[in-house]
Amino acid sequence: MTNHVLSLRGVTKRFGGLVAVNGMDFDVAEHEVVGLLGPNGSGKSTTLNLVSGALPLTSGNITLWGSRISGLPAQTINRKGVSRTFQLVRLLPSMNVRENVIVGAVFGHRRRWGHDASEHADHLLERVGLGGKGDMSLGQLTYIDTKRVELARTLASDPKVLLLDEWLAGLNPTELQIGITLIKSLRDEGRTIILVEHVMDAIRSLCDRCVVMAAGTKIAEGTPTQVLSDKEVIRAYLGDDDA
Amino acid sequence: MRNLILAALAFGICALLPFGDNGYWLGLGVTIAMFTTLATSWALFSGPTHYISLATAAFFGVGTYVTGLGIDTLPFWSLVGLAGLIGAVLAALVGLATLRLSGVYFVIFTLGLAELVRQVITWVQNNTGQKGLYVLTDLDEAGIYWWLLGLAAAVFLTGWLIGRSRLGFALRIIGDDETVAAHSGINTARAKILLFMVPGAVAAMTGAILAPRYVYIEPSLAFAPILSFQVVIMALLGGASRLWGPLVGVIPFTFLLETVSSNFPNQTTLVIGIAFLVIVYLLPNGFVGLLDRVLRRTKANEVQ
């Protein structure tokens, strides 16, 4: 327990009779990029929703720097320094690109307002590769650019932990390379990131460590190479014959 | 800054109306000032959040009763303040109870609220044997007009300040996507309740100011649900996305209602209904939306 930023202990989520997440335990160290993997419906996104406060836990607890964040509303968790993107990009249609990024800067972990926030937003847009596009409306953006705007918004509050929910999903091969490079640059800045991801290339090149889930339970944990050759993991993805 | 000076100038000119005419036009001026105040404050909350509130009549009625009950013991100005305070507290309570609800549930609850308060007052009156209240003051039509104008100016100033504040920005985000708002660190419930208190207070103050005009008040008059609908229609006709939007709806609609109710007194409700259909079908974003569309098109033509 030296420098764990985020710890999950016995985290469980039940939807009626369905146990979506069952007793998850794992830790995330500072400057670490942890991949959360698993077949569809294994509870990855639900786990992320529990961390960000989008859903309440059924039992267990989650701590950020040793203080409990489970049970707190999403806005409080965000203010404590956990920021996220959404599986389906969520931007604010009535605002332009710059305003969409400012949204993340005004009320979150580190707060800015007015000219300061606007400058910070422009700086972040530059950072994610959208320099000079601040005045555009959302309708003028390509798919990957909308993802960039959302990423810039989550970065705008200087979060301690970044949660990326399938940020690379749906990109074409060229965009995917751009996307991986972008996330890698965040990693090189020393950010702490949990990413839910399906793209194997991304997992190999980005993650320090992976946690693999199947049917709501953790089935493996280790470096990408370790978990991707793990028998349980192969069985979960491909069935018994290939294990 | 220029806008502020222009607005102050416009209010100054409006304030001269009672010196020009003391009868028909002043009466119309009072109606316009009343609906401007109500519709503008309504749009401050409902514009960005898209929560349609039908509680105007409830707050308005409470305001008239504050004046009705207190006029013999307290000075008029303190009653207006008191009504604002009670309106704000009532709005906060309603907000706590309902703003977690969304969409249609909120609409129904606010509509029911006016009816609830009206029934409670009627019940109290039936049990005490009292039927209505006389409000007798030396405040004349011009006085009422100036009070309303002052309140309208305060509403515009408040709206302008909110629009530049973090609270105003938070409300726009909530209106677009409440999930994103919460995940950006916004206490959505608190922001909504705070802003809902503004139209609550303003409607109660408007009611308090107008009570002397009615002379005799009773529940069915003070809490008439039609008021809530008129405010919504006027605000939507003008456009709730801009501060000055509702004003653009209030003026033509007041003239329309005036003409209809003097020529066809039995068809007033019909006109309101038709106006509502026209707005929904032809002007979903009001005159403001229409203007924006025209401006965008001319701009696009220039580019070509």
Image: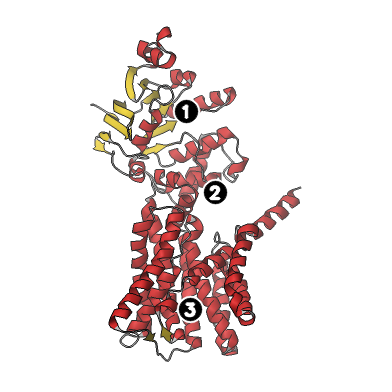
Secondary-structure class at tag 2: loop
Secondary-structure class at tag 3: helix
What's the CA distance linking mark 3 and mark 2? 34 Å
Q: Residue at the spot x=43%, y=55% of the render? A: B105
What's the CA distance linking mark 1 and mark 2? 25 Å
Q: Quadrant of residue A56?
A: top left
Q: Residue at the spot x=54%, y=78% of the render? A: B31
Q: Amino acid at mark 1?
A: Ile
Residue A23 at x, y = what percent?
27, 27
What's the CA distance linking mark 3 and mark 1? 57 Å
Viewer can see residue B85: no
What chain does badge 3 belong to? B
Q: Residue at the spot x=38%, y=74% of the render? A: B62
Left or right: where A158 falls relative to A168: left
Using a 10 Å C-alpha cutoff, classify the residue at mark 3 as few (fewer than 14 neighbours), some (14 to 19) or many (20 or more): many
Q: Quadrant of the N terminus of chain B?
A: bottom right
Tag nearer the camera, 1 or 2? 2
Viewer can see residue B134: yes
Residue A183 marker: 1
Q: Are marks 3 and 2 on the same chain?
A: no
